[in-house]
Amino acid sequence: MTQLTFPPGFVWGAATAAYQIEGAWNEDGRGESIWDRFTHTPGKIADGSTGDVACDHYHRWQEDVEHMAALGLKSYRFSIAWPRILPTGAPPINEKGLDFYRRLIAALNERGIIPNVTLYHWDLPQALEDRGGWANRDTALRFAEYAALLFRRLGADVPLWVTHNEPFIQTFYGYGTGEYAPGRRDPRVMLSVAHHLLLSHGLAVQAFRAEFPSGPAGEAPCPQIGIVLILWPHHPASQRPWDLRASRFADGATNRLFLEPLFRGRYPEDVLRHFARRGIRPAIRPGDLQVINVPIDFLGLNTYSRLVTRFDPLDLIGGARQAASSGPTTAMGWEIYPPCIIETLRQARAYTSVPLYITENGAAFDDAVAPDGGVHDDARVAYLREHIAMAHRAIQEGIDLRGYYVWTLLDNFEWSHGFSKRFGLLYTDYASRRRIWKRSAHWYREVISRNGLEV
Ligand code: IFM
């Protein structure tokens, strides 16, 4: 057995998102979001469920904070529901919604748990979708207004702010394939959606700097702001030129489409060309790319697996198809591939020298409560151990990795899969909403308390 020790101050965390856990979808003045509309439409969610109650975190947040403290979390990453703050996407403010997050942030700070707050984890106010959603440039301006308001009202109590979670997923699944809310199947708007999400990020960072001008040179600014991308390492299914090309395109559409404008101030030419041939063009205005390319303080990376791509002449948009995995998979069907951590970090490092965080990593398995009352999720423990070991290797390689967040704190609403996929450290009994610590939660508590693990 070898002991892997992490640098002092390494941030051990767990992550969630508002719609996946909060419930209380129409309480205390919260407006309707695109996920409310989507889940209330029959046939959209595999098990027919909704996030109306979810984990009931809105009412049980104090209990959940106690679980975080018992785990020894150094940080908790969660998102704010835009329609709780601005029910129609624009002022007036719903003070009750703001109070909910103010209380949560205060409770975390009292326990020494760093709040890491995401402004947008896909729950757009439905009123804005009715005016075109992210395909409409105006939504980016509304987002900047919403962000500025939160920086003003909650900003100083939150050390880590994130503008967007995984703009790729919102773009492709929300507006391209329609598998996620708002459920639009309109590939023609996809690149404009991506562009408006990125533009809104840049505008929000500008608003943040106006609220919190940087400290003296050399001093880390506090609070800090960044963005979270999901990055997949891409591997071709073979060395044949068409598979290599398809894999390069898949990397372009998922990873480089976001990394390049954020850190190099331009879109990847090959991806733009590919889409332009199919009549798909982003609506870019002069000056937009400078706004998107604004400096940030850190980059968050979500990584779960890799994608192995094969050329597919029948796929008219991408010309690419994911090859079936040969190795073991999680309950999502995702290959268990621990090097995803280090490959993702290396790709990010090629673009930027800002500190990096793994803001999500974890696995769904078919967990069940055993007759002894425990949840013995040894497969998740093995998954986490192997992936965290890769994070350690990345640090040894010189990558400036500051923290690691497990997805997710507790089993929750897994989007189009409903409640059928369990990713949590805590098991959620959906009948009673009781939380039960899985074996992985006990194991993770040990990792945190030792600031490392044995492999
Ligand atoms: O549940 C999601 C989360 O909302 C965003 N990243 C991936 C997770 C697992 O699918």
Image (cartoon, helix red, strand yellow):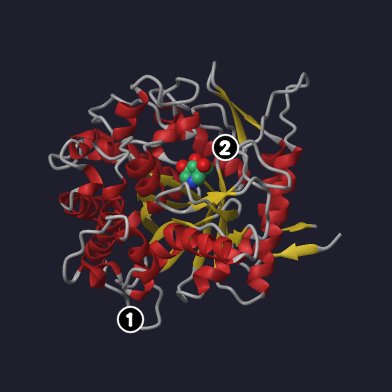
Q: Quadrant of residue 10?
A: bottom right
How many marks can you see? 2
Helix, strand or loop under label 2: helix
At x 22%, y 28%, the residue is: 29
Three-letter code, disc 1: Pro
Quarter-wise, where is residue 297 in the image? Answer: bottom left
Q: Earlier in the sequence, mark 2 or mark 1?
A: 2
Who's the residue at 40% across and 43% down the image? Answer: 173
Nearest the camera: 85 or 240?
240
Q: Quadrant of the C terminus?
A: bottom right
Q: Is residue 183 above or below residue 402?
A: above
The relative height of residue 180 versus residue 117 in the rendered view (above or below) is above
| Residue at (37, 62) in percent of width and height | 274
204 up-or-down from 365: above or below: below
Given residues 442 and 269, the one toward you in this image is 269
Instruction: Classify 10 Å Cα crowding around label 1: few (below 14), some (14-19), many (20 and above).
Output: few
Instruction: Give the labeled residue for mark 2.
Output: 67
